[in-house]
Image: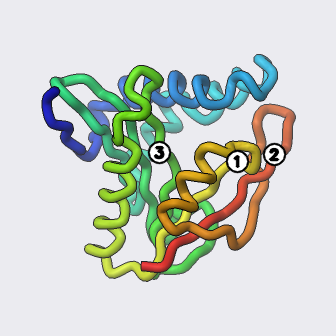
Amino acid sequence: MSATTIRELTLADVAELQAISVETFSDTFAAQNTKENLEAFLQSAYNVPKLTAELQQPDSHFYFIERDGKVLGYLKLNVGADQSEKMGTDSLEVERIYIRPAYKHQGLGSQFMTFAIEQAKAAHKTQIWLGVWEHNEPAKAVYHKWGFERFSQHAFVMGTDRQTDFLMKKKL
């Protein structure tokens, strides 16, 4: 098996970003949400103009993990004012970390988390944080293994359903 590479996205990647965003979010959350709420969220969060605007934010960075020219997953990191919560200048947010279904359980998420921690350290951040759906037990377990601890929560709206994300952080 070939090695993987992680590369930062450009505007030229927006179509592939949209495709993988819809695919991986649906794979992760379709079974626990109504079709209507899922569709409303996907259309609102992952349309090309919105993703284009996100790609142009100076303190948000998207990355693909690839092998043999195939995109296996993606990561979105935020710092400064582009964080989804006011966490200050000493924090880096992992806003999205998704792996395509066919490539799960191959260590790709761990590669992304290692990369995110390296990015935070290189930028002299003192903590890294993320939000995770309160009912996503597998993800919460993985984040605990990485040393993340719950410190708060915020609302996440999926269509007409107001859900709760736990906020977790790790000191660096």
Identity, as a three-letter code, of the amino acid under mark 3: Ile
Quarter of the rendering occupied by the C terminus = bottom left
Q: Secondary structure at mark 3?
A: strand
Comparing 156 with 70, the one in front is 70
Identity, as a three-letter code, of the amino acid under mark 2: Gln
Q: Is residue 161 left or right of residue 124?
A: right
Q: Is residue 120 left or right of residue 139?
A: left
Return the residue at label 3. 97
Q: Position of residue 49 (x, y in %)?
A: 49, 33
Give above or below for 84 relative to 136: below
Q: Residues within 10 Å of mark 3 (few under 14, many from 20)?
A: many
Tell whether label 1 touches label 2 (CB within 8 Å).
yes
Q: Position of residue 119 (x, y in %)?
A: 30, 65
Return the residue at label 1. 133
Per the rendering, the mark at residue 163 is 2
* Number of the front mark, 2 or 1: 1
Q: Residue at x 40, y 31 (%)?
A: 17
Compare marks 2 and 3 and give the one earlier in the sequence: 3
Identity, as a three-letter code, of the amino acid under mark 1: Trp
Quarter of the rendering occupied by the N terminus = top left
Q: Residue at x 70, y 47 (%)?
A: 133
Q: Position of residue 45 (x, y in %)?
A: 61, 35
